[in-house]
Every structure is written in C-alpha cells, then in structure tokens.
Amino acid sequence: MLDLVRARIAAAGGALPFADFMALALYAPGLGYYSAGARKFGAGGDFTTAPELSPLFGRCLARQCREVLAVTGGAILEFGAGTGALAATVLAALADMRALPERYLILEVSADLRSRQQMRIAQLPTALAGRVEWLDRLPDEPLAGVVLANEVLDALPCERFVVRGGEAYRLGVAVDARGALEAVELATTLALPAGIDGAALPEGYQGELRPSIAPWIGSAAAALGHGLLLACDYGDARAPLYHADRIDGTLLCHFRHRAHGNPFIHVGLQDITAWVDFTAVAEAASAAGLEVAGFATQAALLLALGIERDVAAVPDERTRYARATEARLLLLPTAMGESFKAIALTRGLDAALSGFSLQDLRHRL
Ligand SMILES: C[S@@+](CC[C@H](N)C(=O)[O-])C[C@H]1O[C@@H](n2cnc3c(N)ncnc32)[C@H](O)[C@@H]1O
C-alpha cells in the first residue's frame, strides 16, 4: 500500500492532495482499508457503528421505514451496508411488523464487504433473504421508498486545509527524507464553504472540506423518485463545525478501537474519517430537488422512534440489561447520542416523519 502511495506521490510531482491520498488509503482496489480483507467492524475490528453495536438501532429505523413505505410502497436501498447488520435487523423488524418492502437493495463499493453482507443475509429466513439484491450501480429507474446511508458520508474522501492570512491553503501528502509520509502545505487555495470567513479563523487553523458530498447526494437524490433519504453520521451544521475553537479540524483514524489523528501510519489498515458538514448535505439535497424534512441528533431520532419501549419490552432480564447498556451508548451525549445526527431528505412525500417529531434542528443548517 505504501509503495502505491509513494508512486502516486512521485507521479504527481512530489505531493498528492489529501483527498486523493484518502481515496487510495480507503478504496485502492485490493489494498485500501475498505477494499481489502481487514476485519474493520465490531469487537475484533477497529470501530463499532450503531447497527453493529445494537439491533435497537435497526429496529428504530425500521419503524421510520414502515411509516414511509406505507405511503410510497416500493423498496429500501441501502448505501454502504458494512457487514449487513442494518439490513438484517431492518428486514427482521419489518417482517415482525408485517411491513416488508418488495425489495431491499444494497449498493456497496467494497467487494470484501459485499461478500460479508451476502454471508450475513444468507443466514436470514428465505422470505427475507430472497428480497435482498446487490447493485453494481444506481438503479436505472428512480425508486419509491427509502434510501438509507449510515456512516457512509464520513467515509467519503475529504480535503484538508490550513488557514494562512485568512486563506485556506490545501494540505497535501509528500514523502520525507526517510521515506515516511508527511503533511505538506500546497501553494493552491481551496474555497471555504459559503458563510465561513477565513479571516475570522485563527492563523494555522486546520479543517476538512468534502467536495464529494454534493455529487454523492446528487446521485443518491436521482435514485429517489418518491420517498425518504435518511442519512445518519457524525457531524454538525456548518457554523459549529468550522467554529474558530475547533482549531485542528475533525479528522480521526480508527485502528483496533483506538482513535488517533495520524493518517500516515497503518495506511490501508486503519479507517480515516472526518465529521460531516450537514449544511453541505442540505444544500446539495435542495439543489437536487429534495426537501430537508428533518435534522435531529441520533438520541432524539431513536427516542422518537421508541427505543425505550424496545428495551422495556425485552422479556428476558439478562438481554434487557444488555439492551439497556447498548441504548445508553446510542443515546448518551458523551457517547453517540449528540455527535451523531440524522437528516431526512424527501421527494414528494406527504407524510409525517415520527423520527423527527421530538427535535427539529433544521434552523441550525
Ligand atoms: C463506516 S462504514 C459504515 C458501514 C455500515 N453502514 C454501518 O453503519 O455499519 C462505510 C461504508 O460505506 C461504504 N462506502 C463508502 N463509499 C461508498 C459509496 N460511494 N457508495 C456506497 N458505499 C460506500 C464502505 O465500503 C462501507 O461499507
């Protein structure tokens, strides 16, 4: 992996933009973190996502899906399905509610994760597994129903910048005298997002920009003819995300459950992510003709969708205790409850969204 990165740096004349480095580190065929066979998720991996942590997350999302599917009919399309945990839980919960969608489509860029999803889904009863289809590209016809993306946006490559004299200079990746990777300041500048004034940011402030958000939302929006696109991720509205106090940005790497800030070690073996600018998501969605129908913390979403009832309804005491512990991790502000947000983007949907009935943070976007 390092040889490939060094070769690309040399071919680019000595430095690669950070986004190009991150795309290689995560997605280079056969070598990138998501493309190769590392374990990634769960206790034996590098990090745990909400669907991996607990079936409570998928059960709650299934309720939101049911509400929308009752109006739209059609299918669910999940982007970046990880190990298939969310798909398996949502399908099982919708079966319990007698509200199964016609099809559950998965679009996954990683061949390794796709085969793990297939093994996971194969364990479901045939009536559920038979509805799941893997797509190689977006459907030709826009679908009616629900599009889900949990922790997909944060995995899209981002640029890094450093502020010098009020301008955002692009950060790149070069090779130092010992052959190790290092960050370098490039001579080119990047346009800061609308509403962010570089002159108001301290000298040396570092942050991230994700130009891939707009095209990604644009193509996901094009796939949705009628219904809901629900994206959950860690992130915030733009103003708090680019607050002058957040002087080092939000880039984080995950390696064996240790979070740290050095993307130049364990290249191809560790996850690299940065927080999502939900204002950019909302802007791209509006440009693509979607309505921003809700924005809330993960805690507010899950509470509104009945997570407490789900915990209380577990008959066996041991399992109930385990679920209560999981619910705390999903809900607590010090865990995933506040830093993770959910955004509801709709097209032609005339239905209340229960998940967003407790909290409406859209004014912050
Ligand atoms: C952090 S993981 C989250 C996995 C899963 N959704 C979960 O919550 O456990 C990011 C996932 O997004 C996938 N991914 C990244 N870019 C993608 C894209 N452009 N389209 C579809 N999936 C993508 C990755 O391969 C991986 O499955």
Image: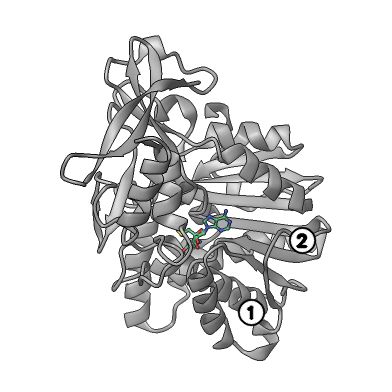
The mark lying in front, picked from 2 and 1, is: 2
Q: Which residue, given by chain and number where applicable, does mark 2 sit on? A: 139
The quarter of the picture where the C terminus appears is top right
Residue 287 lies, with reference to residue 260, above or below; the image says above
Looking at numbered disc 2 in the image, what kind of residue is underneath it? Pro
Name above or below for residue 113 compared with residue 335.
below
**Where is 62 relative to 341, above or below?**
below
Question: Quarter of the image containing the N terminus?
Answer: bottom left
Classify mark 1 as within 8 Å of ligand 1 or not, answering yes or no.
Answer: no
Alpha-carbon span between mark 2 and mark 1:
28 Å
Q: Which dot marks residue 267? A: none
Q: Secondary structure at mark 1?
A: helix
Residue type at mark 1?
Answer: Asp
Q: Nearer the viewer, residue 253 or 150?
A: 253
Pinpoint residue 188: horizontal percent, then vertical percent: 43, 21
Q: Residue at x 55, y 61 (%)?
A: 80
Residue 35: image location, x then y, percent: 46, 65
Residue 211 appears at what percent x and percent y? 54, 35
Residue holding disc 1: 96
**Residue at 70% in and 84% down:** 130
Depth order, front residue of 207/94: 207
Mark sitting earlier along the chain (2/1): 1
- Classify residue 140 by image quadrant: bottom right
Distance from mark 2 CB to nearest ligand 1 atom below 8 Å: no
* Residue located 56% across and 80% down the image: 118
Q: Please indicate, yes or no, whether residue 357 appears anywhere in the rendered image.
A: no
| Residue 136 position within the rendered picture, expressed as x and y whole percent measured from the top left | 67, 66
User: Residue sitting at 34 percent across and 19 percent down?
Assistant: 163
Q: Residues within 10 Å of mark 2 (few under 14, many from 20)?
A: some
Helix, strand or loop under label 2: loop
